[in-house]
Amino acid sequence: MNKMVICCAFLMVSFLVSAEDGSKLWLRGKAVSAEVAAKRQIVIHSESIVVGLASKELEQYWAGSSVELIVDKKLKKLKDGYTISSSGRGLTICAGEEIGLLYGAYHLLRLQQEGKDLQRIAIEEIPDYDVRMLNHWDNLDGSIERGYAGQSLWKWEDLPRTISPRYAQYARANASIGINATVLNNVNASPQILHSDYLVKVKALADIFRKYGIRVYLSINFSSPKILDGLENSDPSNKEVQRWWKSKVKEIYTLIPDFGGFLVKANSEGQPGPQDYGRTHADGANMLADALKPYNGLVMWRAFVYSPTKEDRAKQAYLEFMPLDGQFRDNVIIQIKNGPVDFQPREPFTPLFGAMRQTAGMVEFQITQEYLGFSNHLVYLAPLFKETLDSDTYADGSGSTVAKITDGTLRPAYKTAIAGVANIGEDENWTGHHFAQANWYAFGRLAWNHALSSEQIAEEWLKQTFTDEQQFLKPMIHMMMTSREAAVNYMMPLGLHHIFAFDHHYGPEPWGDRQGGRPDWMPWYYHNANSAGLGFDRSATGSNAVSQYFPPLDRIYGDLETCPENLLLWFHQVPWSHKMKNGHTMWEELCYKYDEGVQQVRQFQKVWDGLESHVDSQRFAAVQSKLRIQAQDAIWWKDACLLYFQTFSKQPIPYDIERPI
Ligand code: GCU
């Protein structure tokens, strides 16, 4: 081969690789030809940048009939949603706000990519939540707390002068699924983010995101006044501190007129907060809320608080926040993790949902897989998200789901919101695992419409991201739909929780014990394995965490006989010989569940291997090798946990399951 040919071959290979590397996410529509474009018109009546963008997207990718984009400010009930209708002349997208037209345009492009019938369309879309937000746990040094897709997307060193093209790609991907807010930095916040040098960098990002309807928020460190400007303290009742926040907020809004507000982790895991000065969460949140109010800014105040007291960790957020119900300003929203401990593979919903009647609450999910195999395991999270959103709190009688409590249906709020901790980094494919893109996608789709089914979202995503061939879709929808339960099975079945290896949370370490370590960071605190049984007694005979739930849940969870078996060891310490509904003893069931998880992943491997002809070689190989890691890890989990718990159960491992290695 001569030099030229080698060079071309190399170029072709690198072209193919970059064309198939997953960087396009689900946005894989093909640009239409000039001929197709000439046959239809995209009509707009606005000079606005957002509307221009909507029109540009359609110009480039829409292969159907003409589309007219109309903003009608009277259409308030649509919020930032839209209608799409068809008539003899083509299609009309109508919205009450300009951004609605961009969302409508992406909706059309999605339908087209899915191969849907586009002849007769009558769509009305109103988002369920006002604020649909990603939380980035990105540090200013470029690392990401619990991030598994490389370093941070934000190049703080280069900003504001150098603008990475990925900023706009990120914003476009978010807008295509309706995400309209982003918190740029870690909840364990560096005070430096509020330094003027950083604020101009934040402004540069906000200027890009604005075109896509995305508002920027920042996590703040409660001690910022003292650390940044040497104030005597950061006590919220100190007038100087209040003035400091007011002037900081003014500085931010001067640079970023549509700034969203602050996310705050205070008096949690060593972070400073109002309690350092004998003040309450409400005192701290309200001080910030008052500074933000003139600009319509919001405070997301996190309820993730716990300390090594005698009290069950799962009860602490409720105990700390319930006495403050009704004391928060209307522009404060309490941001509550979906479960009462910490993003475990399975948790019941946090009992604060519904319990606080006079305070707005929002759900925080974790999209990044801190407790679900990082970016190595294929775990589709829509079923986990839905499990929380569809949970009935019974707060206002039956049907008071977490979704209805937080979306304004049952508790009208100044603003409703939902957040997901992002799984995005600078990896070529954004999320480390190609299938982790589905979790970003699913979070956005559910934040827009929590009634969508997990299957529907999986199908949409697969069709756009891979192919619409049925031979591919059917097995892959099934794989995605069972993947979360598989992970629960091979990690922590029957309500087990937090038996992860210390600190990094990747593999199993139920035996873990660090001399002098905090008990609430030790696995035995959660599994309580001994000769009598396994699990955390949260019934009336134990920590009585069940009492934080509304009737009849308190009774259902509190009784070993009625407690759902998938939460059994969450709420009870269960004798090894306890008879499960299927006749197994608890010990046997534990063994079968761990084994089932392993077998499920083995099946995922077989299914994926059989689909090679439907997937480009780069993504095929990448997912294949991740599934191998997942299968190995599943065995590791099963063997480690069963062999460890067997030292307490003293029972044989049933002979019909895969033997420990
Ligand atoms: C978990 C996680 C921490 C994180 C914390 C939080 O504990 O391991 O890294 O800071 O949650 O949500 O604040």
Image (tube, rainbow, N blue to C red):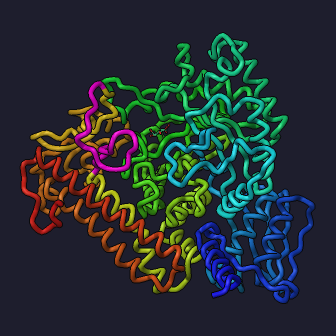
For the N terminus, the image quarter is bottom right
Residue 90, x across and y down, in percent: 82, 82
Query: Residue 264 vs residue 622: left or right?
Result: right
Counting every numbered tag in the picture gives: 0
- Which residue sits at x=48%, y=42%? 337
Pick the residue in front: 278 or 555.
Answer: 278
Q: Is residue 292 left or right of residue 417?
A: right
Residue extending farthest to the front is: 2
Residue 502 visible, this angle = yes
Q: Is residue 462 above or below residue 423?
A: below
When asked about the image quadrant of residue 193, the answer is top right
As for residue 189 lying within the magenta part, the answer is no
Residue at x 36% of width, y 63% of height: 630
Up/down of 276 relative to 538, above or below: above
Which quarter of the rendering shows the C terminus?
bottom left
Where does the magenta region start and end?
Answer: 495-516
Asked if the stretch drawn in magenta spans residue 512, the answer is yes
Residue 55, horizontal then vertical, whole percent: 83, 70
Task: List x then y, in percent, for residue 147.
Answer: 52, 49
Report x, y in % for residue 461: 56, 71
The residue positioned farthest toward the top in the image shown: 232
Between 285 and 405, the one nearer to me in the picture = 285
Residue found at x 30% / y 29%: 519
Magenta highlight: main SS: loop
